[in-house]
Image: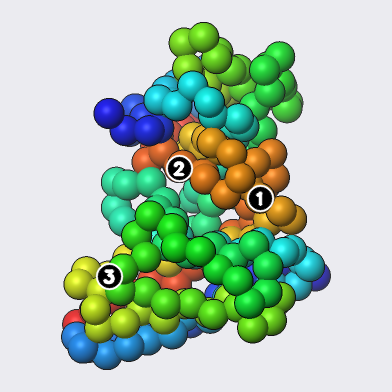
Amino acid sequence: RKEVEQDPGPFNVPEGATVAFNCTYSNSASQSFFWYRQDCRKEPKLLMSVYSSGNEDGRFTAQLNRASQYISLLIRDSKLSDSATYLCVVNMGGFKTIFGAGTRLFVKA
Amino acid sequence: DGGITQSPKYLFRKEGQNVTLSCEQNLNHDAMYWYRQDPGQGLRLIYYSQIVNDFQKGDIAEGYSVSREKKESFPLTVTSAQKNPTAFYLCASSIGGTNYNEQFFGPGTRLTVL
């Protein structure tokens, strides 16, 4: 079993749709969680950190479920510019960080 | 304008050659990292450095070497011992460890072995 697993997609959605991604992790001792965004042939950039209480940033909402060992990302009112690959990132303490393979999102006009 | 720079953007190497990828940051970050990204896979850690003159192997260090003589610089050498070096190489830095700290990435170097 991979340490961090994501549905690779692609998710094809129309503009204005709501889309959700899930990510599961295997190590129950994992300490911090992030979503990064990666555009085609570019570097990853932090989208948001994920807190136990859940957090929201505009159209983006991240949730953490420690009991079931998954995190989620919800995107509301999708824009064309949201088209990218979304990476689930899990830190297991110190410098041990695992990146998921990513979920590809295509938002269509 | 703070950030991380990597050079070159594209690099072509003949089999049997060593090549060095440059990574420089002006964010005053202590920690720096090298990752490799292959299609359909997550980033994999090659080496990381917590402080000047110190570095640690990551998950896939074989065939690679690094140095950290200055806080700002963390070059990666891909040696001829690396059997499948064609990949997208990303350098990153963070204030401290990656626990709770964002990693900032450079634009990457695409290495192709001919």
What residue appears at the point 54 percent right and 51 percent down from the top-left corner?
Answer: A44
Please tell me which residue lies in front, A84 or A15. A84
What residue appears at the point 51 percent right and 9 percent down from the top-left corner?
Answer: A67
Can you give x and y, in whole percent of width and height, for residue B69 in the image?
64, 83
Give the crowd class for mark 1: few <14, some 14-19, many >=20 residues within 10 Å: many
Say which residue label 2 marks.
Answer: A99
Whole-angstrom CA distance, mark 3 to mark 2, is: 20 Å
Quadrant of residue A105 within the rendered picture: top left
What's the mark number on residue A12? none
Identify which amino acid the numbered label 2 is placed on.
Phe
Quadrant of residue A52 within the rendered picture: top right
Chain on which label 1 sits: B
Identify which amino acid the numbered label 1 is placed on.
Gly
What's the mark number on residue B86? 3
Give the crowd class for mark 2: few <14, some 14-19, many >=20 residues within 10 Å: many
Say which residue label 1 marks.
Answer: B97
A18 shown above or below B24? above
Please tell me which residue lies in front, B18 or A35. B18
Chain on which label 3 sits: B
Closer to the eye: label 3 or 2: 2
- Number of numbered discs present? 3
Can you give x and y, in whole percent of width and height, for residue B93 in the image?
64, 61
Question: Which structural element holds mark 2?
Answer: strand
Please tell me which residue lies in front, A24 or A104. A24
